[in-house]
Amino acid sequence: MSGYIIELTPEVRVCSLIGVNSSHLISYRGRSVLIDCHSAELSRWLEHRALPAPEMILHTQVQPEHCREGAQFPSARILVHEPLRELAADRAAYERKAHTIWDHPEEWMQTLGREAYGIAGLTTVFPPERPLNVAATFRVGDRLTWQDLVFEVVALPAHGRDPVGFVLEQAGKPLAFFCGDLIQDPGVLVNLYDLEINYGGTALDAMPAALRQLAERPVTRWFPATGPVLQNGPAQARALATAIEAYQEALRWESGQFKPAPQPEYPQVGRYRQLHEGIYQIDNFGNCIVLIDKQGRGLMFDPGPCDYESKDRIAAFHRDLDLFEREAGLKTIDLTLITHFHGDHYDMAPELQKRYPGCRVGAWDLVARVVEAPWDYPYPALLPWYNVGVDHVAIDDVLTEEQPFLWHDVAIRSIHLPGHCYVHAGYLLTFNGLRLAVTGDTIQSRGLADGLSFFTGNHSVPGDQAGNLKTYRQMCTEQVDLNLGGHSSHFTDCAALYAESVRRIERATPYLQRLVPGGDLVTACLRPQQPHWPARNAGN
């Protein structure tokens, strides 16, 4: 840990203490206040430097890396933002709320999976390593007085949950801005994962306006909770705002070389559209895709109708199958394949096996591991979260990329399709003269080219190796006639759409890299408190 002292006035000094993260000690008239505490050894460091121990500790956020004071300052009054008191001090309440199931699916369109301490069953908010002895709380707009100095509490965009900053004033004159993890030198974001606000959404949209508004305050030195002081915080904040807007503009870019093909009208079989001879896709924004061969044998991909708000959903699923048996020649479904581990893509697998006892469940190898033991993986929207009566599904057939899998005389090739999440498969096959790609949620277009997307809670990282750029480059080589995606999506002008998606993603990715330290999207997207992707050679 290193430290340096900045003199704000002859009497007011800030000692910035910097390791992986940062803390700032305001020293005034022989007394001190600490902003955040990034080290359990901070008291020893202050004693070694003959600096006064803090009598008050203010936190810009409540996260383990910024709240490590423990019991090292027993006389200090610890203050946190009022919405974070429970997170800071009540571990039992935190544990109750951090382990959730989805009891109210009708609220999905309002919450988008946002929970008290997580997103869609994934814990994304973590308490201090040791509960804080919180003496009092504050709210945005409060003015906290200490001696004749004032700390104004200001709202920050959502890096983590309910973060704040402090503008330090003396006699009405701003001296410094303690900006938490809003920004890091040299004017970049600290990471991307702590900007997640719901399932697939981030706080990036709110940041340019907030950065510019904060930059209007007449204070030059900004003290972040990660990294060294920003000597010209307003200029760096404006530059970051401009960079975010450039990224957002890059997301909207189109090459002009692609025009979506019109979507034809298809015949219906109950809730399903018939897209080709023997090929049916559910039309309710669900995921079920059914192939029926000339002998009446069926293959279902992603057995999840995605109608969680319906109390009649199991009966409706069986009514669908009744209709296929009456009108489409279905005799049995003897195989179901799963593209990825989200519960809305395979929760009806047990119902298929009850109805058709010979039905086998298959998945590509990494998907199979998570589906069979979801409790071992820190991903969102796993089957246990859905509260459907089962918490895992046994896999009968583990598919690999090296060896095609045979469904009767149909060869099915498994491929890795990261982008929506890392542990995601696609399945390629030729059926009734048509080359099909079943792509789950990584490619769920209805005819429009895709752009850059990243889902940090799913451990999906944009880039050549693991993101949707890898996926679309792969798909450009596959000569697909019909792409069947998740949530009732499909399109036929496959090669052109894949190529335009590659162009759009390649255009936007460098702009995203400019927003994060060193352009390192892997570090920016992968939450360090959680394990990373399962290795191919990992044990069961």
Image (cartoon, rainbow, N blue to C red):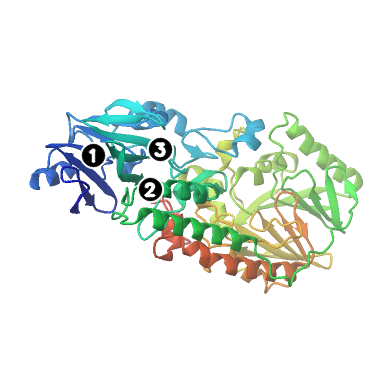
Label 3 SS: strand
Q: Residues within 10 Å of mark 1 (few under 14, many from 20)?
A: many
> Marks 2 and 1, Cα distance to the nearest angstrom?
16 Å
Q: Work out whether 457 lies above or below 91.
A: below
Residue found 58% across the figure and 33% down from its top:
102
x then y, percent, for residue 487: 72, 49
Residue found 31% across the figure and 51% down from its top:
221
Residue carrying label 1 = 34
Amino acid residing under circle 3: Val
Residue carrying label 2 = 181
Residue found 67% across the figure and 74% down from its top:
477
Q: Can residue 463 be seen at all in this image of the molecule?
A: no
Confirm or deny contact between disc 2 and disc 1 (CB under 8 A): no
Q: Answer with the quarter of the image where residue 129 lies.
A: top left
x then y, percent, for residue 270: 86, 42
Q: Earlier in the sequence, mark 2 or mark 3?
A: 3
> Marks 3 and 1, Cα distance to the nearest angstrom?
17 Å
Left or right: 108, with 6 as reference point: right
The front one of 385 and 70 is 70
Residue carrying label 3 = 154
Q: Earlier in the sequence, mark 2 or mark 1?
A: 1
Q: Earlier in the sequence, mark 3 or mark 1?
A: 1
Q: Can residue 218 be seen at all in this image of the molecule?
A: yes
x then y, percent, for residue 71: 19, 33
Amino acid residing under circle 2: Asp
Q: Work out whether 24 lies above or below 109.
A: below
